[in-house]
Amino acid sequence: MENIQFISPSTPIIITVISLLFLMLSIYYIRPWLTGAIGSTRIQREINLLQKKGATVMNHIQLPTKKGDIIHIDHLVITNTQIIAISTLGYSGDISGSIRSATWIQETSQGQHRFPNPVKQHEILKQTIQSTLGDRLKIRTISAFTTGRLHGTDSKDVIPATECAKTIHAELEDITSGSKQHWATNIIRNIALEDADSRAEKERVFIARQGNEKRLKTARYMMGTSASLMLVAIILAGVRLASNHALIA
């Protein structure tokens, strides 16, 4: 046990401080992802309330378009008078773009990143639903940005996640269920494709939509390092304590 005496009393403390620094850095890097996750959870909670009031809610479904492509819908709220399709977008940083541009721009500390214009995605989505249901129900599409700051996005269909609940409740004319609602729900369920993506694939898509893949990987590495260092500090502190106890005894 003599070699244990060379473990300095300050060693576990130093390792603990270093691990806490790694943990703080990982939280900094993962913050945009956490903000997006919180925003998505808030939207899901509001949608669940609508379901309790009589609306039909379908989450994470895929519909085939006329061109043979697949369009993903995060949330679909169906009532007896209308349908609201909601997309949650987790792009961080400053978001800018116009209705007519093909792509929008995300600006972060890592640079610029372009992504498809959500308004044009709305048009495809509306056409896909209308080609199946016709004009019997009013269709509204919403893109809710869960973390980014919107600048000059001249569309009432593109809003921050914090305004999503208010917008949905203001838009819905009647949440009472009825025959049109059941009819539309059955048709959409019949044409919807099974979302058979694996958990890893869903996570990859979610990260890609945020443009934070590098940050999340870095945060995971730092969190793993922090946990390892903390474990080492606990072990060394335990060994030191056992050594002192043996010497006293």
Image (cartoon, rainbow, N blue to C red):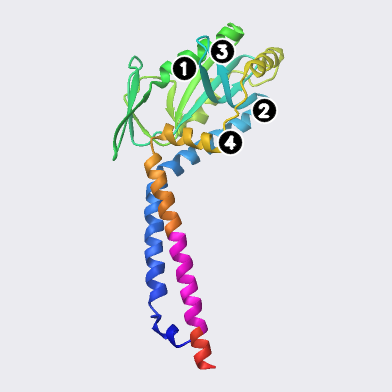
For the residues labelled 3 and 1, the Cα–Cα distance comes to 11 Å
The residue carrying mark 4 is: 45
> What residue lies at 42% left-to-right and 21% top-to-bottom?
118
Query: Decide: marks 3, 1 in contact (CB < 8 A)?
Result: no
The amino acid type of the residue labelled 3 equals Ile
The residue carrying mark 2 is: 53
Asked if the magenta segment contains residue 65, the reply would be: no
The magenta region covers: 226-242
Q: Position of residue 2 (x, y in %)?
A: 45, 88
Mark 2, other Cα within 10 Å: few <14 / some 14–19 / many ≥20: few
**Secondary structure that dominates the magenta span:** helix
Asked if the magenta segment contains residue 241, the reply would be: yes
Please tell me which of labels 2 and 1 falls first in the chain: 2
> What residue lies at 60% left-to-right and 11% top-to-bottom?
137
The amino acid type of the residue labelled 4 equals Arg
Q: Nearer the viewer, mark 4 or mark 2?
A: 4
Q: Position of residue 192 (x, y in %)?
A: 62, 19
Question: Judging from the image, what secondary structure is the residue with disc 2 in?
Answer: loop
